[in-house]
Amino acid sequence: MADHANILAVRDLHAYYGKSHILQGVALDVNEGEIVSLLGRNGVGRSTTCKAIMGLVEAHGDVTFRGRSVTGMRTDLISRAGIGYVPEDRQVFPTLTVRQNLELGLRRSGIFGRWNFDDVFRLFPNLQQRQNNPAGVLSGGEQQMLTICRTLMGDPDLILIDEPTEGLAPRMVEQVGVLLAEIAKRGIAILLVEQKLTIALKISHRLYVMGHGRIVFEGTPADLDADTSVQREWLEV
Amino acid sequence: MEIVLNPLLNGFVYGMLLFMLASGLTLIFSMMGVLNFAHAGIYMIGAYVAFDMSRLIGFWAALIVAPLVCAAIGAGIEVWGLRRTHHNGHIAELLFTFGLFFIIERGVQMVWGMLPVPYRVPALLDFPLFRLYGVDFPAYRAFMLLIAGGMLLAIRLLLTRTRVGLIIQASLTHPQMVSSLGHNVPRVFTLVFAGGCYLAGLAGVIGGNYQVTEPAMAASLGPIVFVVVVFGGLGSLSGCFVSSIVIGMVQTFAVSIDGSLADLLGPIVAWIGTDNLAGEILSIPVSRVGPLLPYAMMVGILMFRPRGLMGTRDT
C-alpha cells in the first residue's frame, strides 16, 4: 500500500482542554485505500485527534486532506471535502427511524455514491427489518453498525472510526471486522481508533500507538506484534 | 355546565396563543441552549407592527407581512448577536437576550408611546359566532384557533416529513454529529431562530387585538411563556403543547373560581379557625391565587421532576 498517494497528513497537531495539553504535536499519515490503526490507552488523546481533524475541537497545527489544508475549516465543510467520522459514543439520532438516520447521512437527498440503502440492508438484514423503528431502541451493536453505515451514506474517501468494538459482544466485534473489510474493499481509507489489539492487528496495514498526547510507535502489525516492550508500556494487554 | 364550558373554551384559545410563543422558544432553547428572554419582545413587535400595518395595508396583509418582519429581526439577532456571544457561554447569551428584551421593550415604547394602541379585531371577524349559556363566543377566537391549529400542523409536518425537519430534530440532541455528516448546523440554528421569531410575531398579530396591544404586554406574557417551556419539558413539542393548554386552562379557570380551599375543606377550617395564619391562607379565594399558580407549578416541577412533563433531558 506504500505506493499509494497520501490522502491525510497530520503534522504537529496541538490541542488543549483548559490548561491540559491533550495533543502535543501529533503527526500521522493515511494513504489511499489504507487501513491505519491508532492505538493507545484511555485518555492519551486518540479521540481528541479525530475531533481535531474534524474541526470539532480547537487545535493548532496542520491537517492536510488530499493536498488541501482543512485546518480551521468548519466541520460540515471538512465532512463535505470527503472525511467521514464515526464518534466513540455511537451518536444515533434516537427519535428518528433507522431509515431516517441513514437518510441524514446523505449529503443530498436521493444522491448516492458508493453506498445506498440496499448495500446497508444486504450487509445488515437486522437494520432492514427495523428500518421504520426509532434508532434509540436498537441494541448497542446495531446502533454501532447504523452509525458507521450512516457515515458511509455520505460517500467519504476517508473514514475516522472511534472505538467501534467498545462494549460489543464477540460476535458483533466480528461483524465490525467484516464491515471494515467491506469498506476497505470499496477503496475507502480507514483511520481506526482502538484501545485493544483485537481486530487492529488482523486488518491494519499500518499502526500508530499514542502515549501522553504523542505518537510513540509507528509500524506494521508484524513490527508491533514483535515489540513486546511497546505493548507492555503503552497498551493494555 | 356554564361555569365549565366558557372558561374551557377561553382557556383553550389562550393556551393555543401560549403555544405559538412557547413552541418557538422551546425549539430555540432545546437546540441552542439559549433561554431567549427577548422572545416575548418579538411577540410585542409583532403586535405593534401589525397595528401599524393594518391601518396602512389592512389586517390580512399584516397577517402575512408582520411575522416575516419578526423572522427577519430574529435572523439578524442570531447571525450578528448570538453567534458572537456564543463563544462566551450560555450565561453571556442569556444576558445578551435579557438586554435585548429591554431594548425592544423601551424601543417600542419610544416609537408607539406609553398608552395602549387601538389595535382592533378586523371588521370581517367582529361578530359573535355562537352563544353559549348567554355568553357570546366571538368569531375572532375561532379564527385564532384556526391559525394556531394550522401552525401546529405545519410545524409537525415540517419537522417529521421534510429533510430539513429531520436535520432540525437531530440537531436538537446531537449538533456535533449532524455537522460531522456535512450539514451546516449554524445555518440550521439561524433558520430555527428565525422560525421561532416568526411564530412569536404571528402570535403578536393575532393576540395583540385579542388581548390589548400595550407597552407592558411583553413583560406580562414573557414569564408565563418560560413557565410553559419548563413545565412542558425541553426538547419536546408535544410536552410544550400539553403544558400550554394546561397553563392556559389553569389561568382562565383560576380567575373564574370564587371559592377558596376553605370552602372545600369546610369542617377542617372551622376547626382551625380563620383567625390564625393557616386558616387565613386556606380562605384566600382561588381567583386571587390564580396569577401565582403557574409559577408555583414551575417551581414545583423544577424541584420534583426537572425534565418537565415530557422533556428529554433535565432543565
Image: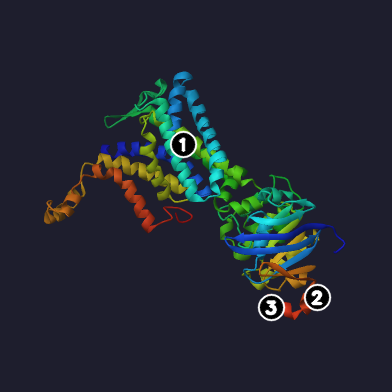
Residue A210 in sight in this render: yes
Question: Which residue is most to the right?
Answer: A3
Q: Amino acid at mark 2?
A: Ala
Q: Nearer the viewer, mark 3 or mark 2?
A: 3
Question: Which residue is most to the top?
Answer: B56
Q: Are marks 2 and 1 on the same chain?
A: no
Residue at image location 48% in from the left, 27% down from the top: B63
Residue located beneath label 3 in the image: A233
Q: CA distance from mark 3 to mark 2?
A: 18 Å
Circle 2 SS class: helix
Q: How many marks?
A: 3
Question: Which residue is most to the front?
Answer: A19
Q: Are marks 3 and 2 on the same chain?
A: yes
**Mark 3 falls within which chain?**
A
In this rendered view, identify the residue nearer to me: A207 or B159. Answer: A207
Please, is residue A105 above or below residue B136 in the view?
below
Which of pointers 3 and 2 lies earlier in the amino acid sequence? 2
Query: Where residue B138 sits in the image (x, y, percent)?
Result: 35, 28
On residue A222, the disc is 2
Query: Where residue B127 sits in the image (x, y, percent)?
Result: 36, 23
On residue B200, the disc is 1
Circle 3 SS class: helix
In this rendered view, identify the residue nearer to me: A189 or B115. Answer: B115
Q: Are marks 3 and 1 on the same chain?
A: no
Circle 1 SS class: helix
